[in-house]
């Protein structure tokens, strides 16, 4: 039986209203997140005057996102993916508004706590959102949907961070935090309008231990015993480790850009990063047509 041709980006948005609403909510939420990301770095630097303080923020953000996902991935199978996304956005909106209370150095701890909470909520949201895509797309739409999500993340980074940088430079960090909260609320509203089909979770024999630690152990077993998956996971992990250092350097160099403020400099550099990561998936889709070779190319491209 001949497979249907893959749809294009615009065709996917036209023909799949459920995915369109998910994508629209996701786009606005991500735009708001990157809009306020510059504000986090600027607020920490204003409160502490220390690059070390910014470095600590990076460590807390990355650890709070990466470590919980070992466990939060299971939530997307056990609970409603739609409501996981809605509650993650609603609680994120509340959390980021708490930063409006921070106005002196002795309260810098609240910035770190809120940043950690936002990343943990992101660790709940991301697996739920990723697992939802196959539920609401056809086979010939899935790859396009994944590529569009990846491109949207980059476009939101490029546009959100650049706009956020200049807005923070002109009006202060409070505007960025309020904008981000509104974006989270809009995303939650959009997710509430869609239906995400989901198979009911069936517990394995063995009780709580088998269905928690056993599930995580099985996931690692699959990674270590499946070479293509192992290569992809390794490439992603290495990029996250060393790419995190690159992003930190962008923040440190931002003040030297000659644009008048730290916020504007960071915004421009993050916009350049977003432009590159946005073009990457689009160019790769047409340049590397042999998909069986994609795991091989991942390693080399990350190395380069």
Image (tube, rainbow, N blue to C red):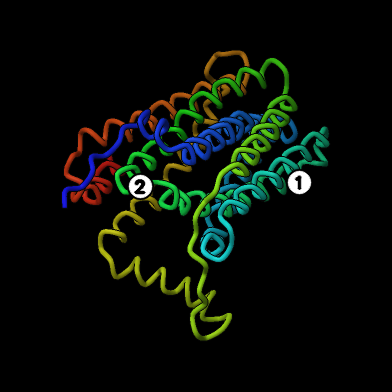
Q: Nearer the viewer, residue 245 or 217?
A: 217
- Give the alpha-carbon distance from disc 1 to disc 2, as whole Å: 46 Å
Look at the numbered disc 2 and give the secondary structure of its residue: loop
Q: Which mark is residue 138?
A: 2
Residue 68 in sight: yes
Q: Residues within 10 Å of mark 2 (few under 14, many from 20)?
A: some
Q: What residue is shown at x 26% (from left), y 35% (from top)?
A: 284
Look at the numbered disc 1 and give the secondary structure of its residue: helix
Residue 206, above or below 249: below
- Looking at the image, residue 241 sits to the left or right of residue 46; the answer is left
Q: Residues within 10 Å of mark 1 (few under 14, many from 20)?
A: few
Residue 82, above or below 284: below
Residue 227, above or below 195: below
Q: Which residue is mark 1?
A: 109
- Judged by depth in the image, the label closer to the viewer, 1 or 2, is 2
Q: Quadrant of residue 185?
A: top right
Q: Quadrant of residue 264?
A: top right
Q: Which mark is residue 159?
A: none
Residue 31 location in percent, x, y?
A: 56, 30
In which quadrant of the rendered image does the C terminus lie? Answer: top left
- The outermost residue toward the bottom is 206
Residue 297 location in percent, x, y?
A: 23, 45
Q: What residue is shown at x 63% (from left), y 51% (from top)?
A: 121
Q: Earlier along the polypeptide chain: callout 1 or callout 2? A: 1
- Looking at the image, residue 218 sits to the left or right of residue 7; the answer is right
Q: Nearer the viewer, residue 77 or 139?
A: 139
- Looking at the image, residue 284 sits to the left or right of residue 122; the answer is left
């Amino acid at each position: 039986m001949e497979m249907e041709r893959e749809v294009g980006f615009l065709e996917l948005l036209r023909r799949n209203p459920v995915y369109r609403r998910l994508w629209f909510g996701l786009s606005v939420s991500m735009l708001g997140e990157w809009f306020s990301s510059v504000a986090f770095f600027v607020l920490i630097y204003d409160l502490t005057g220390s690059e070390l303080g910014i470095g600590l923020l990076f460590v807390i953000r990355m650890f709070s996102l990466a470590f919980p996902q070992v466990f939060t991935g299971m939530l997307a199978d056990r609970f409603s993916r739609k409501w996981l996304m809605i509650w993650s956005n609603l609680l994120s909106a509340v959390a980021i508004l708490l930063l409006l209370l921070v106005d002196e150095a002795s309260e810098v701890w609240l910035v770190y706590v809120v940043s950690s909470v936002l990343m943990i909520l992101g660790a709940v949201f991301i697996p739920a959102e990723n697992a939802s895509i196959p539920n609401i797309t056809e086979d010939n739409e899935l790859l396009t949907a994944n590529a569009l999500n990846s491109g949207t993340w980059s476009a939101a980074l490029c546009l959100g961070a650049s706009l956020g940088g200049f807005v923070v430079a002109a009006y202060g960090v409070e505007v960025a935090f309020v904008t981000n909260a509104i974006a989270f609320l809009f995303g939650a509203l959009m997710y509430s309008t869609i239906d995400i089909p989901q198979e009911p979770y069936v517990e394995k024999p063995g009780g709580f231990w088998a269905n928690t630690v056993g599930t995580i152990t099985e996931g690692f077993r699959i990674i270590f015993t499946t070479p293509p998956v192992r290569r992809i996971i390794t490439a992603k992990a290495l990029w996250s480790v060393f790419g995190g250092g690159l992003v930190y350097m962008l923040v440190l160099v931002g003040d030297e850009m000659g644009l008048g403020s730290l916020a504007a400099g960071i915004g421009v550099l993050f916009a350049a990063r977003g432009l590159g990561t946005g073009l990457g998936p689009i160019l790769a889709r047409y340049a590397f047509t042999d998909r069986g070779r994609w795991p091989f190319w991942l390693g080399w491209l990350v190395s380069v």
